[in-house]
Image (cartoon, grey):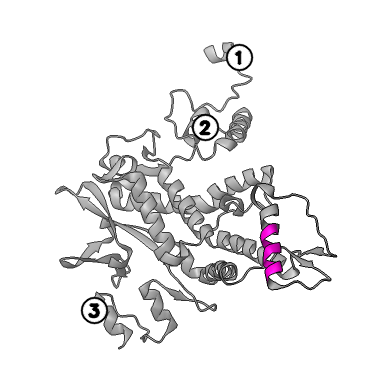
Amino acid sequence: MALTKIRKALGFGVEEKALTLTDSDALTLFGVSPTATGLSVGPGNAMRVPAVNCAVSLISETIGALPVKLYDRASKSTLTDHPAYRLVHGRANPWTSAAKLREQLTIDALLHGAGHAQVVRLSDDTPYELHRLEPGKVQRDQEPDGEPFFRVHTDAGQVRLSYRDVLRIEAVGGVAPITLGREAIALAISFENHMATSLKNGARPSGVITTQKSMGNEAIKKFIKDWVLQHTGMNNGNAAVLDEGMQYHPISMTLADAQFAENRLEQINEIARIFRVPPTMLFELSRGTWSNTEEMFRQFHTVTLKPWLKDWTDAYAQCLLTPEEQDDFYFEAVTDDLLTTDTAARATAYGQYRSMGVLSANDVRAGLNLPRRDGGDELSNPYTTTQKEQAE
């Protein structure tokens, strides 16, 4: 059966390239992606990889926890009385907070390529609620002139929605990171399976005892039983006494074992690259120090979170503000708590710019998302201006 028929039955548009169920690309429609290891990677088994789970949770939970506010461009004041403010800062709907919705849609984008929420409006077109849409029930399409729209599958059938009525958060290129990095994730799964199988089906002793005297089966069993009793549990580390010419030979880690351990660590680094997360944020601390960990935390904000937050604020503006309001208002995520380690550096930089006459007090306040103050546009150096000059 041709895949195009399946897409028609599900209500999807027909792609230019016809695929059959024997094509490897066909599996992506069912949430799995084949790899060279023979494993198919999808949201289910990818999230069972600790590094992937940690990266997805870290990005989505941080984005959800950061408060988002609506500001006036001119005055920098917070517009708490605007209908959209409640949807981004309070509750998206009666059963979902705004923070939880951001977390859920970010997870959808990380695992499926995009997350969607429908904007429910009042009769006067005022946005009233945001409802999450299941990833598999939304298809993005566009008009001949390029204007996008969405086909949403509901219990009552397919519904067509304007781009202003669907809030869309997408990964880079609309492709989930677990799809782009499926080979690295599959290799991590293979390493886990190999180790689990080795421990289940075979065991390697930590050492070997040799003797010059032949021992019967019963004597060997008794010796092993006494050895375990004397050197395990609370007796671990006790001195061993060997008689009858016995010798103990410890088995050290082989080069292959060491290489296997290094490869497992390298897979954590590969997964960190997939999600653009510093490895130390995934608790891979083999090369972590106090100084570079602090720097990587700043990189996490700049490299990892900023593109996602920009996508969120743009999506909010497109769906919750009118075209006229978009010129005067803007959404912004408050990242002050995330950057507390950099507060001293920011304060020093602002102070230097003020003393150089590059920034005014209102410029600094704008950078801190604070409202303007009367008389705050002067570029004079506040550290050298005398009280007499201020009075004049």
Where does residue 194 sit, x and y in percent of width and height? 58, 71
Classed neighbour count for the residue bearing mark 1: other residues with Cα under 10 Å, few (<14), some (14–19), many (≥20): few
Where does residue 280 sit, x and y in percent of width and height? 61, 51
Residue occupying the point 34% across, 50% down: 101
Residue 45 location, quadrant: bottom left
Circle 2 sits in a helix, a strand or a loop, which is it?
helix
C-alpha gap between disc 2 and disc 1? 21 Å
Q: Name above or below for residue 86 compared with residue 270.
A: above
Where does residue 389 sit, x and y in percent of width and height? 57, 14
Residue 110 location, quadrant: bottom left
Q: What label does residue 9 carry, if any?
A: 3
Q: Amino acid at mark 1?
A: Thr
Per the rendered image, the range of residues in magenta is 218-226
Which badge, 2 or 1, is on the more N-terminal residue?
Answer: 2
Residue 132 location, quadrant: bottom left
Image quadrant for the N terminus? bottom left
Q: Amino acid at mark 3?
A: Ala
Query: Do we see residue 157 in this rendering?
Result: yes
The label nearer to you, 2 versus 3, is: 3
Q: Is residue 171 left or right of residue 282?
A: left
Most foreground residue, 22 or 246: 246
Q: Is residue 224 magenta?
A: yes
Residue occupying the point 54% across, 72% down: 183
Which badge, 2 or 3, is on the more N-terminal residue?
Answer: 3
Query: Do we see residue 170 in this rendering?
Result: no
C-alpha gap between disc 2 and disc 3? 57 Å
Residue tagged by mark 1?
Answer: 386
Residue tagged by mark 2?
Answer: 364
Circle 3 sits in a helix, a strand or a loop, which is it?
helix
Q: Is residue 95 magenta?
A: no
